[in-house]
């Protein structure tokens, strides 16, 4: 580490380097398919992107935009079911 608290490029590369075994282990892990966003999740995505670009960008940076859309779709489906069956 340098005197100003910064890392040298060699230290950064060492920290980021992975062994062949580590890479193979990561590739062999089962990957769960992403849940579909659904009709209402997609509509929410478009609405937020067009009308609230700052909020949309925030959720994209936090990496939870897709989860948020899946949740919106789930809640919309539940409300529709309640309206139909009640």
Image (cartoon, rainbow, N blue to C red):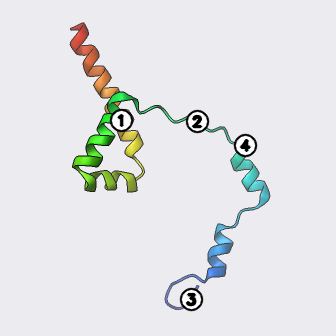
Say whether residue 61 is left or right of residue 46.
right
Local crowd size for mark 4, using a 10 Å CA cut-off: few (<14), some (14–19), many (≥20): few
Query: Which residue has dot 2 on it?
Result: 32
Examine the rendered structure and indicate whether residue 40 appears above or below residue 52.
Answer: above
Local crowd size for mark 3, using a 10 Å CA cut-off: few (<14), some (14–19), many (≥20): few
Q: Which of marks 3 and 1 is nearer the N terminus?
A: 3
Write the residue at 25% across / 8% down: 85
Considering depth in this image, is 52 or 63 the residue closer to the camera?
A: 52
Query: Which residue has dot 4 on it?
Result: 28
* Foreground tag (3 vs 2): 2
Query: Which residue has dot 3 on it?
Result: 2
Q: Residue 3 bears which disc, if any? A: none
Examine the rendered structure and indicate whether residue 37 appears above or below residue 77.
Answer: below
Query: Which residue has dot 1 on it?
Result: 42
Element type at marker 2?
loop
Considering depth in this image, is 14 or 44 the residue closer to the camera?
A: 44
Q: Earlier in the sequence, mark 4 or mark 3?
A: 3
Residues under labels 3 and 2: Cα distance?
41 Å
Q: Say whether marks 4 and 2 touch (CB < 8 Å).
A: no
Q: Earlier in the sequence, mark 4 or mark 1?
A: 4
Q: Where is residue 28 in the image (x, y as percent from the top left)?
A: 72, 43
Residues under labels 1 and 2: Cα distance?
21 Å
Say whether residue 73 is left or right of residue 10.
left
Q: Position of residue 67 (x, y in %)?
A: 40, 40
Q: Position of residue 75 (x, y in %)?
A: 30, 27
Element type at marker 1?
helix
Residue lying furthest bottom: 3
Q: Position of residue 34 (x, y in %)?
A: 51, 36
Q: Say whether marks 4 and 1 touch (CB < 8 Å).
A: no
């Amino acid at each position: 580490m340098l005197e100003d608290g910064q890392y040298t490029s060699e230290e950064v590369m060492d920290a980021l380097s992975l062994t062949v075994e580590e890479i193979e282990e990561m590739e062999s892990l089962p990957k769960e398919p992403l849940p579909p966003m659904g009709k209402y999740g997609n509509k929410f995505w478009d609405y937020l992107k067009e009308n609230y670009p700052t909020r949309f960008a925030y959720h994209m940076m936090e990496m939870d935009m897709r989860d948020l859309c899946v949740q919106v779709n789930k809640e919309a489906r539940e409300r529709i079911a309640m309206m139909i069956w009640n």
